[in-house]
Image (tube, helix red, strand yellow):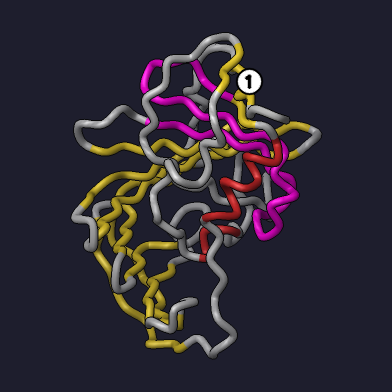
Amino acid sequence: MLRSAASLLVSASILLTVAPVVRAGDPLPGRMPTLTLPPRLQRPSGKVRVGSWVEFSVHDRTRRRRFRLHWALVGKTRRGYWWELTFREARKPLMRIKTLIRGTVTRPSRIRRVIIQSGTTRPLELPMKAGQKLMSVYLRRRRGGKMRDHGAEQLRVAAGLFATRHYSWKDSSGQTVHEWISRRAGIWGLVRFRSPRFGMELIGQGSGARSRIRGIPAKWHLPGR
């Protein structure tokens, strides 16, 4: 069981032909999408069992993209907890990111390992500093302004009917964002999130998840390091 852990963050679909040692330029952050996740997805709302999973639909209204994000807590070691994100978008290779994290991702230094796999290619393990850089690109800080409570709302989404609490706050650009929270929603308690650019909605949750990354990861070699 886990009281504090981190969200896995989004990667773009990267088409890679992998040799035992991969020699390439720094893959971060230019090849990654510009999605920044809600701060709530950096700290679970309560105890989380290994095998727990949640899945969200995401709509990027600016870029007119729709995709799915599936998070799962897939393992526990002495060094921390393994989280795995699966990123699905129509007509693009499926992407998985598996991350070993100690505590929460509010400090990138707690990220110990990052492994990525695109489609059926061989998985890649990023150097620790590069993996930490990947994660830090997506961290969003809630501004110090007061969060507004809009009260209780019944909300029906693809994952079911939830008794939620509706809140709003200002993001780093000063724009108002909204989130709907429920104790029945898995891992982070998030049912719906809305910002001027992005919308996220819970479409499924459950237990029994296992890592789906297959193969021994190759090391991503960054020239000069």
Closer to the camera in the image, 143 or 29: 29
Q: Quadrant of the N terminus?
A: top right
Q: Going by the image, does 181 lie left or right of 106?
A: left
Look at the image and give the residue range highlighted in magenta.
95-124
Horizontal and vertical percent for residue 74? Answer: 57, 33
Q: Determine whether the residue tagged by mark 1 lies in a helix, strand or loop.
A: strand
Q: Is residue 45 magenta?
A: no
Q: Quadrant of the C terminus?
A: top right
Q: Residues within 10 Å of mark 1 (few under 14, many from 20)?
A: some
Q: Going by the image, does 11 lie left or right of 88?
A: right
Horizontal and vertical percent for residue 40? Answer: 52, 65
Q: Quadrant of residue 216?
A: top right
Identify the residue position indicated by label 1 in the image: 219
In the picture as drawn, the residue positioned furthest to the top comes out as: 20
Residue at 50 percent of width and 86 percent of height: 147
Residue at 60 percent of width and 54 percent of height: 136
